[in-house]
Amino acid sequence: MPYDATGVLPDALCREFDDGTNLLLSGPAMSGKRNTLLELVAHGESDGEGSVLVTSRDPAEEIVDEYEGVLGGPSSFLHVVDCVSTQSGSATAAQGVHHVSSPGDLTGIGIEFSGVAEAAGEAGVDRLRVGFDSLSPLLMYVDIQRLFRFLHVFTSQIQSQGWLGVFAVDPESHDDQTINTISQLFDGVLEVRVPEDGGQEARVRGVTDTPTGWVPLEE
């Protein structure tokens, strides 16, 4: 059963993603890519799919508030791996929040994600959408070789479980070789941008028969 993207992405881009798809969501700062990521993850909740968010930019409270705003209410199954905030504070008591010491703690991220997978199994949730916002801060802590090895394991777990993974990255923060190296691990790339006249546009390559052109995204 594919993962539905109808209503989030225009039909001209992609209406669904196969089980086990890992998608790289590439766009510069202020391009709206995080909202697009949250919409793609939240879209599955109406079909009983669970949601996982890994945040390396903002603390769990902020990402949960944004996610519930996109969803229009509380989630039935949402777990957050928080690589930003410390365990002191209100997030500690929040159900489903897993803390990692920093975005550079790749081992910790992997361990907490495996714990989320176990929690999903215990809750009877066999389909997950995983949103990772964002890969760019990780590269401030680790080199591309370490990140590549980490992502290989992380995306392989998503693929083997038949889930959907959406990983954001800011291409303007890295050189072309780094982006090309990361892209090798993904089934496709969804690029977003803000044209000069405003709005938001996107294009897809790798998960469609042929690469698409730039298509406006609905507000």
Image (tube, grey):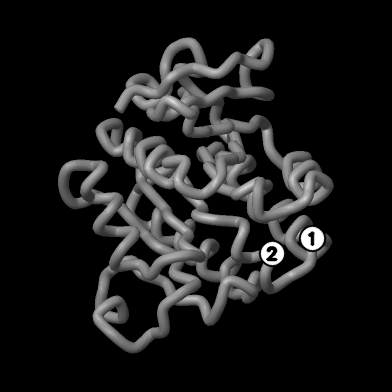
Checking the image for residue 139, the label placed there is 2
Quadrant of image for the C terminus: top left
- Amino acid on which the number 1 mark rests in the picture: Ile
User: Tag 1's secondary structure?
Assistant: helix
The residue at the point 24 percent across, 58 percent down is: 65
Q: How many labels does the image show?
A: 2
Residue found at x 31% / y 81%: 92
Residue carrying label 1:
144
Q: Do the residues bearing badges 2 and 1 touch, measured as CB atoms within 8 Å?
A: yes
Q: x%, y% of residue 15?
A: 45, 17
Image coordinates of residue 139 in percent, x first then y, are 69, 64
| Residue depicted at x 66% and y 23% | 205
Which is nearer the N-term, disc 2 or disc 1? Answer: 2
Q: Position of residue 71 (x, y in %)?
A: 24, 42
Direction from residue 160 to residue 50 in the image, left or right: left
Q: Is residue 4 in sight in this rendering? A: no
Location of residue 22 (image quadrant): top right
